Amino acid sequence: EHPQDVLLNDPVLLNFADKIATVTISRENRRNALDHFAMERLGQAFEEIDASDATVTILTGAGQKSFCAGDDIKAYRERTAEQSKAHFKNGLRVFDAIEIHSTFVIAAIEGYCIGGGLELALCADFRIASYSAHIALPEVRSMNAYPSWGGLTRLPRVVGRQTAKRVALMGDVLDGNAALNCGLADMVVDAGTTLSSA
């Protein structure tokens, strides 16, 4: 018997229907950004799916404004340097596990998919974006930081080196059409329909 949806205050919801697992980052008030607790739950969700009979996993964010806005900057400021180091290390572990997961992982991308959110989407096998998606790696230019969850390795493999340079170094923002044209998105659909399309 599969577990049902977890408590609504949990940062990551997991639901099974037939052989499809749906993982929802449920932090809409924080644009579904990943603090250390959400990252831990994300990893646990994919471990639970691995132990199930699911063959497909849909990864999405709560609401229509954001798939995932990456690392939670507010939580980042509240962590010690040691806690942040552990958080980033755990993020690498979780994202690697998603990339090689036993199920076919589909990212349903609505709204903001930035920073670590884009790095997360890059771990999926298939990406469906809305036309109005806002896809970017803003941390290089705006925060003097770099994508630390594997994005600089995965992005060039998906879109090529030149596009990856534009996104990472120049701060280019892609909508759904631009993501489709460069190969970052496999399908582009109307806003609000990425989950049903997945």
Image: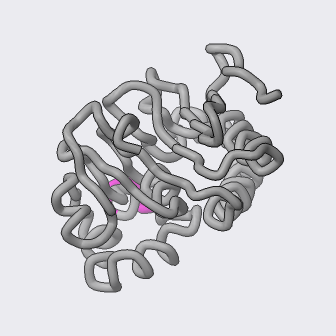
Determine which quarter of the picture holds residue 10. Answer: top right
Q: Residue at x 70, y 61 (%)?
A: 102
Q: Quadrant of the N terminus?
A: top right
Above or below 152: residue 178: above
Query: Quadrant location of residue 140?
Result: bottom left
User: In percent of the image, x 30 and y 53: which residue is there?
Assistant: 135
Q: Position of residue 180 (x, y in %)?
A: 23, 63
Outermost residue, top side? 8
Magenta region: 141-145
Above or below: residue 4 compared with residue 172: above
Apparent side of residue 70 relative to residue 35 in the rendered image (left or right): left
Residue 53 position, x and y percent, is 75, 46
What colouring style does the render use?
Answer: one colour
User: Visible in this render: residue 43?
Assistant: no
* Left or right of 102, for residue 151: left
Residue 18, x across and y down, in percent: 63, 35
Q: Is residue 24 visible?
A: yes
Q: Is residue 169 above or below residue 53?
A: below
Q: Quadrant of the C terminus?
A: top left
When the figure is inspected, residue 26 is found, relative to residue 100, above or below; the finding is above
Q: What is the count of numbered marks?
A: 0
Measured as percent of width and height from the top left, residue 41 is found at 72, 37
Asked if residue 7 lies left or right of residue 69, the reply is right
| Residue shown at the point (52%, 44%) measured from the top left | 58
As rendered, which of 162 and 180 lies closer to the eye? 180
Residue plotted at (52% across, 26% down): 27
Residue 187 covered by magenta stretch: no
**On the image, which quarter does residue 194 sit in?**
top left
